[in-house]
Image (cartoon, rainbow, N blue to C red):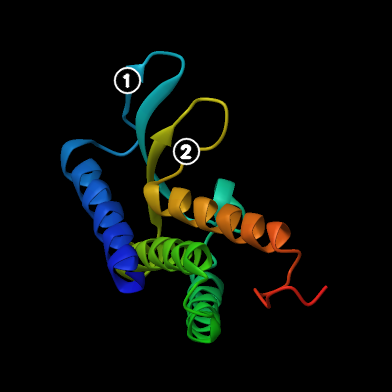
Amino acid sequence: MFLAIIMAVLLVDQGTKAAVRMLMYQGESIPVLPSVFHLTYIMNPGAAFGILPNQNVLFITTGLLLIAGALVVYRKLPAEKTILKIALAMVLGGSLGNMADRLRLGKVVDFLDFRVWPVFNLADTAILIGVFLLAWELLKDGGRSDRGSEH
């Protein structure tokens, strides 16, 4: 399941980005729901919200460390920690999607534009959902693993 989620996120992310690159020109914005949601093709040289532009070495290094760390954590998780495993897979799939863009294009393809915050992509969405699930599970669990009724 872990690898399947990573691959699904990566393939959907890269597929949508390829479609945007083939069907739109940079800077083009197509209203889907006018004033609410547009498809807007931009090339983002930075991190989330365009911060730290043109720092690919930093982003790729950080991404590799994140991926390595997530794999270590995954291997140590008990089998019953399904939500945590799904969350890690989503973060990994999204990280790999954005890293693939940086390695291939030097920038990240963004296209989801809700008009009230910066344009983003499906990899960003997977990362955000994964981080939210991780936080939710850890807070819900009080940071403890399932140890039965020790308290």
Q: Which residue is mark 1?
A: 32
Figure quadrant of the N terminus: bottom left
The answer to whether residue 134 is left or right of residue 24 is right
Identify which amino acid the numbered label 1 is placed on: Val
Secondary structure under tag 1 reads strand
**Image height check: is 107 above or below 49?**
below
Mark 2: amino acid: Val
* For residue 31, above or below residue 60: above
Q: Residue at x 33, y 19 (%)?
A: 31
Q: Position of residue 12 (x, y in %)?
A: 26, 53
The dot on residue 118 is none
Point out residue 117 in the picture as x, y percentages from the top left corner. Answer: 57, 33
Badge 1 crowding class, 10 Å Cα cut-off, few under 14, some 14 to 19, many 20 or more, is: few
Q: Is residue 97 left or right of residue 143?
A: left
Whole-percent x, y for residue 62 in the image:
56, 75
Residue 119, compared with residue 150, is above or below; it is above
> Would residue 137 be found to the left or right of residue 127 on screen?
right
Q: Nearer the viewer, residue 53 or 32?
A: 32
**What is the C-alpha distance between the residues marked 2 and 1?**
14 Å
**Snapshot quadrant of residue 28:** top left
Q: Are marks 2 and 1 in contact (CB under 8 Å)?
A: no
Q: Report x, y in % for residue 54.
A: 52, 62
Viewer-side residue, 14 vs 47: 14
The quadrant of the picture occupied by the C terminus is bottom right
Which residue is identified by label 2? Answer: 119
Which residue lies at the image location 47% right of the left edge and 69% below the top edge? 85
Q: Pick the residue in front: 148 or 101.
A: 148
* Residue farthest top in this picture: 34
Q: Which residue is rendered at x = 40% and y = 55% of the image?
A: 108
Q: Which residue ends up furthest to the front in the rendered image?
A: 149
